[in-house]
Image (cartoon, grey):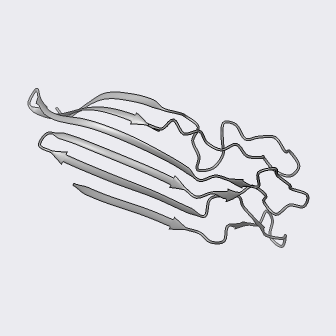
Amino acid sequence: MTIRHLMTYQPVLETQNLPGTAFNWTNQPKTRMTTFLNYQVGDWGFNVQNQWLSGAKKATGFANQNYTTPRLHSYDVMDVTIDRRFELWGGSSDFYFNVQNIGNTRAPLRGQNASVPGLFYPVIGPYSDMGRYFTIGLKGNF
């Protein structure tokens, strides 16, 4: 069994469009965490990956940016894989079944910028709006 946890925290997220202009803070999550859990029993493996992004403010520092809901909620996505290793034609092979975004979590929608208040679609930044999907595969070394 192995567990791995990665975490980043960026307390100040500022951008500067041109040298000498004012800094604006960005509406990206300040905290990101990814956890990997792998469990192996004989030829069978069970793997879980969880990605969590903290909530963020929607406004980016431009004047007159007002939102009914001023914050993006946190975002959490989990992926699960089950695999089986075996011998095939003298080499090692791996048959796997994977479910990405097992909770079918939707990415948050947010405004594009102050001059074009549309929405980024599908999404921008670290988010993915792919939804739940399944993969079945066979890997082999021959």
Q: Quadrant of the C terminus?
A: top left
Give the residue drawn at x 41%, y 42%. Answer: 79
Query: Vertically, is 84 above or below 29?
Result: above
Where residue 102 appears, as percent x and y from the top left, is 44, 37
Is 46 left or right of 107, judged from the image as shown? left
Indicate the quadrant where residue 58 lies. bottom right
Question: Residue 40 versus residue 88: which sits nearer the camera?
Answer: 40
Locate residue 82: give its quadrant.
top left
- Measured as percent of width and height from the top left, residue 116 is found at 86, 45
Left or right: residue 86 versus residue 32 is left
What residue is shown at x 86% (from left), y 61% (from top)? 62
x 19%, y 47%: residue: 40
Residue at the far left in the pictured view:
90
Query: Which residue does the image show at 23% across and 49% down from the upper left?
Result: 39
What is the number of callouts on the image?
Answer: 0
Image coordinates for residue 93, horizontal then vertical, percent: 18, 33
**Left or right: where 124 falls relative to 84:** right
Q: Which of 103 and 130 lies nearest the eye of the viewer? A: 103
47 sits left or right of 62 in the view: left
Extreme-front residue of the structure: 68
Q: Quadrant of the N terminus?
A: bottom left
**Residue 26, how many percent across, how many down?**
72, 61
Location of residue 135 with respect to 78 vertically, above or below: above
Seen in the picture, residue 2 relative to 22 is either above or below; the reply is: above
